[in-house]
Structure formats: structure tokens, C-alpha cells
Image (spheres, rainbow, N blue to C red):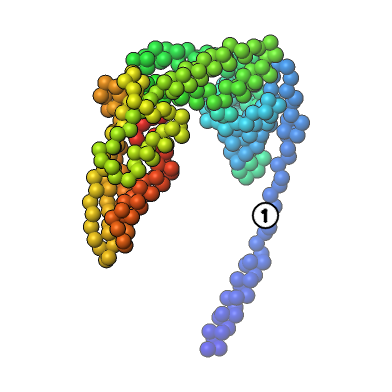
Amino acid sequence: MRVVALILAVSMLMFLSACGSKKRVVVNKTALPAWYMHPPQSNEKELYGVGEGKDKQEAVLNALNMMLSTLSISISSDYRATTVIKEGTHFNSHDATYVNEVQSHMSTIRISNYEVLQRKKLGFKKYAVLLKADKTKIFNSLREELDLEFNSIYEAQKIVQKENAIFQLAFYRDALNSFGNLKEKLLIMSTLKSQFDSTKYLQKYEALKKSYEDLKAKITFTVLQSKKIGEIKSIIESALVAKKFKIQKNKGARHFTISIKVDTTKSLAYGFILLHANIMLQTKDVRGVVVGSNSLSVSGQSSTTYDVAMHNVVRKFQQIVDEKGVAKILGLDI
């Protein structure tokens, strides 16, 4: 036992001695470059920005936020870089600049041809970059993008006129949604070029909005139910009216008929009346073409009567419509 104790004591002394002999590692701080501490100021022709992040991509994104902060833009971007070698040099990562294109958001604002002028690793998982962008190129890119978007919509508009009114309505809605950041984009363009007149683009947007509203006002629905089982029909009608659609009998080209079929099965278990309802919904246009359909299984129970069980089925159906929306319930894109 004494021998064992002696061995343990010697081992402990050797371990403590080894721990004490380890040298401390001192990490020197990286000096911050002058361009990082005192970046160039944006001017009438160019925008500058400094950013840092855990990697180069994050640093670039943060620099874009900084660079465009004077335009009140909040950016999230998809990064793409092309290396450009300076003329008269061999390839060296320190001698290369990076011309980038960014898909940025206020919803989607495209910033093109910015350059990474400087970059430096400041420490573990910490990079810094200095960016420059030409204001004229940014303006021209935004204008070309708007012209392309409107022209694409006008071409598609000619095609969708042959489709049913619900399809057309979805087209106009999606077109309007694609311009969700139009006012902000036009404001940026006006900031980049003071002579820019945004009236033309605002008028184009308002024309699309009017087409959507006029079409929606002309769409009508009739709701039919094969047999009176609860208030399924009235729930659908109320939900459509809440979305500003009209419920009326009509035979026009923009009229749609919703048919509701409810199959029920009843059973008894442990003193409860169990009611299972299979609710089938189908929407047809004036030509009898099915444009939307769906089916739901809803169950209810009661310890007293069948009517109470049905009431629970209807109540659950109402909850489903409220949660998912009548468009999803009907299988319609409205």
C-alpha cells in the first residue's frame, strides 16, 4: 500500500510540474487598416461602404448595408463574385478585385457592378471589406429591371385573357405582388438621379391594380348543397363575402358554381354518438369546367343527440375555414 501511495504521489507531482511548464500563448491583435477606420465618403458619382463579418460573404453584405444606408435601404443578398485581375500583374489574391452582382431586398433590388476595393482578415472569423459602387450603373440597372418586369407582364396579360376569370384574377394579384417594393425602388432611383420622373411607372402599376379590382368586382358565386346538413353552405358564402366576392345567381362568363356534397356515417361508442362527415367541394365555371375542388373529413361527437354531434361537425368546419382560409378550403387561387 505504501508503494502504491508513493507512486501516486510521484505521478501527481510530475503532472503538476508538466502543467506549470506550459507556455502561455499570446495572440497579437491585428492592426486595423486606415481604409477601415477612415473609409472614403460617398459622393455624387459613387457610393462607398465598409463592413465586417465572420466570413467574406457576410462582410460584403454588411458593407452593402453600410454603403446604401444613406438611401435607407435594408439589404439581404445572394452573393456572386467574379475575380478581375489587374492588368500587367500575375495572379495574386492580393492584387485581384472582385466585381459582384447582388440580388438584394427591400423585397428585391438588384445592385450590380460593385467592387471590393479592400479586404482584410482582422482575426478569427472576422473579415472586413471596403466596397465601391457607381450610382449611374445602379440607376440604369433598376430602370432596366422595371421596364423588363412591366413588359413581361404585358405579354403574359395577352395570353391569360383566354383563361377563366379566377385564373386572370390570380395573374393580376401576382403581378401586383411582384411590385411590392415599387415605391421604395422609385424613391431610390429618384435619390440616385434627381431628374428622374417616376410618374410613368406609378401609372402602369395603378392600371394593373384597376384591372384587378374591376375583374374581382365582376366575379360572382352560387353555392349549392345537395342536402341540408348543418350550416356548411352559409359558412362558405360568408367567407366569400368577407373576401369581397358577390353571392348571386348569374350566367355570365365570370360566374362560378360551388357544389357541396356531405356524406355522413354515425356510430356509437362508450355511450357517445360519433358522427363522421366527408365534405366534398367542387367549383365549376359557366362552361361546366372544374376549376377547383377539395374534400375534408370532419368528426363530431355528443353524449346526447345526433343534432348536437352535427353541430360539433359544423363548428369544427368553421374553425378549419377560419384557420386555412376559404380559398384553400375550395382549392381556388383567389
**x, y percentage for residue 272?**
29, 62
Say left or right for 54 vs 218: right
294 or 23: which is nearer to us?
294
Give the amino acid type for the residue marked by disc 1 in the picture.
Val
User: Which class describes the residues within 10 Å of circle 1: few (<14), some (14-19), or many (20+)?
Assistant: few
* Residue at disc 1, secondary structure: loop
For the point 58% across and 29% down, the residue is 106
For the point 62% across and 14% down, the residue is 198
Say left or right for 245 vs 277: right
For the point 30% across and 58% down, the residue is 305
How many marks the image carries: the answer is 1
Q: Quadrant of residue 58?
A: top right
Residue highlighted by disc 1: 25
Q: Can residue 95 be seen in this view?
A: no
Q: In which quarter of the image is residue 34?
A: top right
**x, y percentage for residue 267?**
23, 57
For the point 56% across and 13% down, the residue is 203
162 or 27: which is nearer to us?
162
Q: Quadrant of residue 84?
A: top right
